[in-house]
Amino acid sequence: MTTSSNLLFVSSSLFNGQSKSREIAGEYISGWRRANPSGRVIERALSPENIPHLSGATLAALGKAADARTDDEAKAVAFADSLIEEAEAADTIVLAAPMYNFAIPTTLKAWIDHIARAGRTFRYTAQGPEGLLKGKKVVVVVSRGGFYTTGNAAAASMNHQEPYLRTVLAFLGLTDVTFIEVEGQAIGPDVAAKGLEAARAAALSLVALPVAA
């Protein structure tokens, strides 16, 4: 049974309850809850209304002393700080990340831009950059209309979703990363159902459930 006690769930689909990435992430989280009955789940459901893109004004505010910030600057910094604190407190991070135009949603990119902060979640050293969000497990559920796995070389070359996430997560110190792929969702009902079922099985296999007495 996993010993994690805090899970952060970040979803980024435009389709809310119809989201396949969210559905499969929910399967994993349900299993995690059963294995961690006293665990805590924090959810960030990202949308254009609640996660602004990182702005020059926010970057400038981050560089100011706290007592030199305007009220708006203080609010922007406090919001970014709250996102970082959620990531720092989590033992497990679950990302639900659909593929939009061969990459991740802009809301998820905005979340990453807010938590990637020099001196807090990464730092530069004489040996190169060092990620500071270490020792956490990350599960990324990626959903796609087609098939972009390595078995399809032409389509795999258009996949800027998984390679980017692996790179930026590793940069932040998150190297224990497992991807669950929900593919073929736009090809047809039968193919979509098979892809969803395979992803569901993969999600549940990641959670070691306690054996009933």
Image (tube, helix red, strand yellow):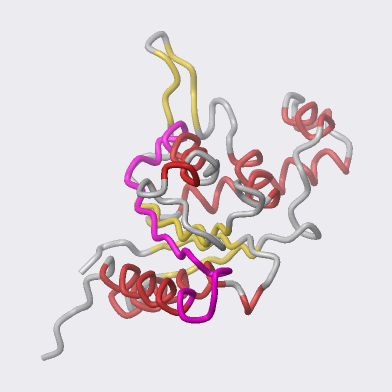
115 with respect to 41 (left or right): right
Residue at screen point 76% across, 29% down = 59
Residue found at the far top of this picture: 126
On the image, the x and y values in percent for residue 110 come to: 68, 45
Classify 208 as above or below 87.
below
Residue at screen point 84% across, 32% down = 57
Which corner quadrant holds the C terminus?
bottom left
On the image, the x and y values in percent for residue 146 come to: 53, 60
Counting every numbered tag in the picture gives: 0
In magenta segment, residue 191? yes
Classify 67 as above or below 199.
above
Tell me where residue 135 sits by quadrant.
top left
Which corner quadrant holds the N terminus?
bottom left
Tell me where residue 73 sits by quadrant.
top right
Residue at screen point 64% across, 44% down = 109
Stretch in magenta:
170-192
- Of the pair 169 and 134, the residue shown nearer to us: 169
Residue found at the far left of this picture: 213
On the image, the x and y values in percent for residue 163 come to: 47, 39
On the image, the x and y values in percent for residue 191 come to: 46, 74
99 with respect to 197 (left or right): right
